[in-house]
């Protein structure tokens, strides 16, 4: 008799984006003809830059000639891409060997799967609020109890609040797996080197492992802020880093990412090299490598020309964030993030809950955003606006907020 994984029944998520769609559709049915402006979802909108398109085309063309045709490649990715990624770290002052780079089809899947090489009884700590995949993947793996308004039983929530500048204090007791995301989705906060150093020291002391999600690293323009956790001394002993081409190069639909598992990375019962070989085994068993066409595109993202063009596109989104930030601030709304991240995190005015503000923004301004409470209990009372949009839509949404929001 087949039985299902009952942990799926514990999941409370899946609720956020369907609920946003439900309320938006209800509003549109009641207000036919109204144009809704969407600053909700973190999906890219601008076309792929020419240098990267050339790389993708070359990937396709190579398949059409016998001399350059390739079939299955290494699960870990093609050499040129792994070398290019290792070089990206070198430019940021961190030494990563190409053999420590695992190319994949997305940071979403990697951030969900990485917990699978660790013991079921590991205690997991997450930033609150956080990208929901970290929590959900651990719920499905059976590391939590049921959830209530305070989150899942058994998970350690590390609140990120106005008081601590949206970066958490160190866990009070001993935890084993720690998820950090910088630049952060949803708060837009970027961890400093000093803040990361404290977590690296904690992890080394407790033989914990940090999963460092840097999917938005290319949005960091402040040179004092770390783009990688490996800029911190000792991090390769205790940190696994995830990054993605999605937001850097408009690859959300193309799909390409990477995870770094350093040889030096340890766990309580795993000496250097063990985590690296477990992840190698995991990928070789469950994954047959990212598409060769897409990897050719990835190589071109890392070329000088590709970097210049994708940097310009990232700067365009950051300009959107700045338009959102100054528009909201001009009407007295308190905002955070946006300077080195594509997300603006605002405090719902008048003490409104996240969902109350969602309804108000939709009804008064016809703008759709994302309620902060959907990312975790500490997100209550906050709201996320995304800077991934065409300029005219962002400007129209901001001027509607300035004109119509009653606060
Ligand atoms: C923090 C964070 N990590 C990972 C991802 C997923 O990236 P990918 O498109 O590479 O799966 C996202 C996507 O929104 C994200 O916000």
Image (spheres, grey):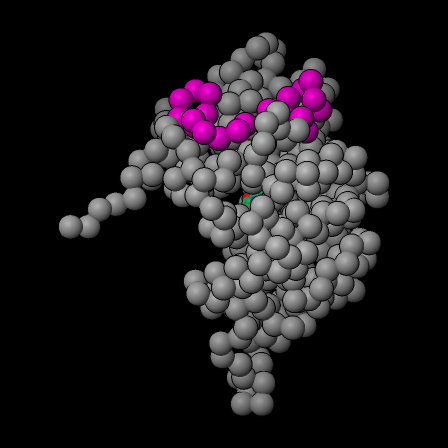
In the shown orientation, is residue 316 left or right of residue 284? right
Q: Quadrant of the C terminus?
A: top right
In which quadrant of the rendered view does residue 345 lie?
A: top right
Instruction: Please name the residue shown 45% across and 40% down the image.
Output: 121
Vertical side of 105 occupied by 126: above or below: above
Relative image position of residue 352 (x, y in whole percent): 54, 13
Magenta residues: mostly which secondary structure? loop
Splitting the image into 4 quarters, where does residue 178 fall?
top right
Asked if residue 164 lies in the magenta stretch, the reply is yes
**Residue at x 51% of width, y 16% of height:** 353
| Magenta residues (range) | 147-169
Q: Is residue 77 shown to the viewer in this render? A: yes
Q: Is residue 363 above or below residue 183?
A: above
Q: Is residue 304 above or below residue 182?
A: below
Q: Residue at x 57, y 58 (%)?
A: 274
Residue 265 as seen in the image, left or right of residue 192: left
């Amino acid at each position: 008799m087949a039985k299902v994984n009952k942990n799926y029944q514990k999941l409370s998520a899946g609720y956020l984006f369907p609920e946003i769609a439900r309320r938006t559709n209800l509003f549109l049915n009641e207000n036919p003809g109204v144009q809704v402006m969407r600053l909700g979802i973190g999906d890219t909108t601008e076309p792929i830059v020419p240098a990267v398109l050339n790389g993708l085309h070359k990937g396709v063309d190579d398949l059409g000639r016998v001399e350059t045709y390739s079939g299955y490649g290494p699960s870990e990715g093609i050499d040129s891409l792994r070398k290019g990624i290792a070089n990206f770290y070198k430019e940021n002052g961190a030494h990563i060997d190409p053999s420590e780079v695992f190319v994949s089809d997305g940071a979403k899947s990697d951030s969900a799967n990485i917990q699978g090489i660790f013991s079921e009884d590991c205690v997991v700590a997450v930033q609150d609020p956080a990208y929901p995949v970290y929590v959900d993947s651990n719920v499905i793996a059976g590391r939590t109890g049921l959830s209530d308004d305070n989150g899942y039983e058994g998970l350690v929530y590390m609140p990120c609040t106005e008081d601590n500048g949206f970066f958490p204090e160190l866990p009070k007791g001993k935890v084993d797996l720690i998820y950090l995301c910088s630049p952060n989705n949803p708060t837009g906060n970027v961890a400093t080197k000093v803040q990361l150093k404290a977590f690296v020291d904690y992890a080394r002391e407790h033989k914990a492992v940090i999963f460092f999600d840097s999917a938005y690293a290319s949005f960091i323009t402040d040179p004092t802020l770390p783009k990688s956790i490996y800029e911190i001394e000792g991090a390769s002993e205790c940190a696994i880093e995830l990054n993605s081409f999605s937001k850097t190069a408009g690859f959300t639909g193309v799909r390409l990412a990477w995870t770094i598992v350093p040889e030096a990375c340890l766990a309580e019962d795993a000496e250097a090299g063990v985590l690296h070989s477990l992840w190698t085994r995991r990928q070789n068993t469950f994954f047959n490598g990212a598409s060769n066409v897409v990897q050719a595109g990835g190589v071109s993202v890392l070329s000088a020309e590709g970097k210049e063009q994708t940097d310009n596109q990232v700067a365009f989104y950051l300009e959107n964030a700045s338009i959102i930030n100054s528009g909201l601030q001009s009407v007295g709304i308190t905002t955070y993030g946006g300077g080195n991240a594509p997300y603006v995190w605002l405090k719902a005015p008048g003490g409104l809950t996240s969902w109350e503000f969602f309804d108000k923004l939709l009804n008064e301004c016809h703008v759709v955003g994302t309620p902060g409470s959907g990312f975790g209990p500490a997100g209550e009372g906050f709201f996320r606006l995304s800077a991934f949009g065409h300029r005219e839509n962002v400007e129209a949404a901001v001027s509607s907020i300035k004109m119509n929001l009653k606060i």
